[in-house]
Image (spheres, rainbow, N blue to C red):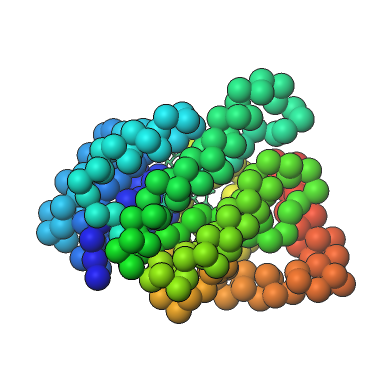
Amino acid sequence: MAGTALITGASAGLGLEFATQLARQGYDLALVARRADRLNAAVAELSERYGVSVSAIVADLADPEAPEHIHRQLADTEVSFLVNNAGSSGPDLMAERDWRKQLAFFQLMMTSMAHLCHLFIPAMVERGFGRVINLSSMSARLILAGDSNYGPAKSYVVALSEGLAGAVASQGVKIQALCPGFTHTEFHEAADMMEFKNANPDYLWYDADVVVRESLSALERGKVVYCSGRLYRVMDALVRFPPTRWLLQKTVVEGIAARRARN
Ligand SMILES: NC(=O)c1ccc[n+]([C@@H]2O[C@H](COP(=O)([O-])OP(=O)(O)OC[C@H]3O[C@@H](n4cnc5c(N)ncnc54)[C@H](OP(=O)(O)O)[C@@H]3O)[C@@H](O)[C@H]2O)c1
């Protein structure tokens, strides 16, 4: 059953790839992001290529009013698929002294996601069909020393998704927290982390189309917490055990952190 897929952060990266793959499956699309020009380009391209109806909603999800605004825009639309994907790297919790910047980050990464779930999932339950993917990260599975914002926010996404999935699974609504590892998108450009990206080996990096394809297939198989990429699934299994968790922290993770600090 198709319907409309609402995708946040659809002007680039994983969000745009979700839009492409869901349009290919026959979903109409409602695309959300801040950059109107990028959204309009996606509307033109995806509607032309896949013959589905595509609309753009310009919104800043760091603004607490944004979820209600999006919900109002879609009052007459059956949203059957929600992809809560918008996100960015955050300010350092200690170094950034402007609390408003911290709040904007929490709003974007956690509160707006919970709010959109709150607004859109009840209608899915009523109709007996729905799909929700919430973008988490491998950063939620193995938190780096010193990462007091991004990883913890992504851990909330896992907990939120697990809690919601348990409540609605029997009502036709499937929910997933997607935990990608490093993925080629604009994320590291936007966060000014290109040197860090270039310093990491190629085998750690996946293409967005692979991440999205695996996620959509895993959602149908009922995977509530899903790490995309075989390498990251192995890593995720290993970090469940304290000795290998310690070893990974010491070698891989501290190696990456040291390279990041050098860059
Ligand atoms: N790339 C990775 O390695 C990686 C790994 C794990 C998890 N993730 C997660 O995957 C998700 C997508 O990231 P990506 O890698 O695709 O990054 P990206 O290429 O930088 O795309 C981020 C998207 O989020 C939107 N966005 C950012 N801030 C927003 C705001 N305040 N309001 C509305 N939209 C906003 C951006 O659009 P506008 O700028 O036009 O608003 C853009 O469409 C994020 O949640 C990220 O944390 C990424």
Q: Is residue 87 above or below residue 207?
A: above
Q: Quadrant of the N terminus?
A: bottom left
- Place residue 124 in its image quadrant: bottom left
x%, y% of residue 208?
43, 60
In this view, the residue farthest toward the top is 98
Residue positioned 85% across, 70% down in the render: 242
x%, y% of residue 154?
61, 51
Q: Is residue 114 above or below residue 82?
A: above
Q: Nearer the viewer, residue 122 or 51?
A: 122
x%, y% of residue 59?
36, 33
Q: Is residue 172 above or below residue 47?
A: below
Judge left or right: residue 233 versus residue 256.
left
Q: Nearer the viewer, residue 140 or 78?
A: 78
Q: Is residue 191 above or below residue 213?
A: above
- Place residue 233 in its image quadrant: bottom right
x%, y% of residue 161?
55, 59
Residue positioned 76% across, 62% down in the render: 252
Q: Quadrant of the C terminus?
A: top right
